[in-house]
Image (cartoon, rainbow, N blue to C red):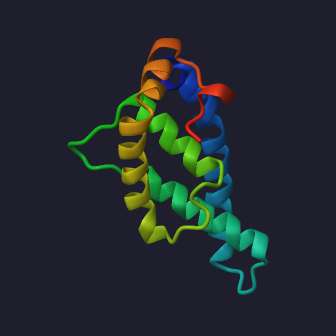
């Protein structure tokens, strides 16, 4: 089924995620054999690790599509880049709680329009 079953908002954020994770996997394999990595490569590897971390979720706690979209957007747009990898999960949980409490209209907008535009972004 793939992306044919995804709403437009998910396609918008998932494309960048897929690209970044593919590049990360390639770099990660390369980095195993390289001893001296430049700062840009180190940053890209760190972002890939954070992206991998934010995709983890409890087996019996599926996320709503709007929460998935916001989570992916947060990771692919650098909002997690300053966090330690161990802090990512806690930050994402706090972000979801904050958005549910303070921006409930975001969920309604994504659910009704199925689109994620500049005006509808969480930050």
Looking at the picture, tell me which residue is in the foreground, 93 or 119.
119
Give the left or right position of residue 109, taking residue 96 as reference.
Answer: right
Callout count: 0
Looking at the picture, tell me which residue is in the foreground, 111 or 94.
94
Looking at the picture, tell me which residue is in the foreground, 113 or 54.
113
Residue furthest front in the image: 102
Residue at 57% of width from left, 25% of height from top? 9
Residue at 29% of width from left, 38% of height from top? 62
Residue at 75% of width from left, 85% of height from top? 36
From what the image shows, is residue 19 above or below residue 3?
Answer: below
From what the image shows, is residue 29 above or below residue 56?
Answer: below
Residue furthest left in the image: 60
Q: Residue 89 location in percent, x, y?
A: 39, 59
Please tell me in which quadrant of the rendered image residue 102 appears: top left
Q: Residue 46 location in percent, x, y?
A: 61, 68
Q: Residue 33 location in percent, x, y?
A: 67, 80
Q: Residue 63 location in percent, x, y?
A: 34, 37
From what the image shows, is residue 97 above or below residue 67?
Answer: below
Residue at 60% of width from left, 33% of height from top? 121
Residue furthest top in the image: 112
């Amino acid at each position: 089924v793939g992306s044919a079953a995804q709403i437009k908002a998910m396609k918008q954020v998932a494309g960048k995620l897929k690209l970044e994770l593919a590049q990360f996997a390639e770099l990660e394999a390369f980095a195993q054999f390289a001893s001296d990595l430049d700062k840009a490569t180190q940053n890209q590897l760190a972002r890939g690790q954070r992206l991998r971390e934010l995709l983890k979720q409890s087996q019996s706690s599926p996320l709503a599509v709007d929460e998935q979209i916001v989570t992916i957007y947060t990771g692919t747009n650098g909002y997690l880049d300053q966090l330690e990898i161990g802090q990512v999960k806690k930050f994402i949980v706090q972000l979801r709680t904050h958005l549910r409490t303070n921006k409930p209209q975001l969920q309604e907008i994504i659910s009704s329009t199925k689109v994620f535009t500049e005006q509808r972004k969480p930050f």
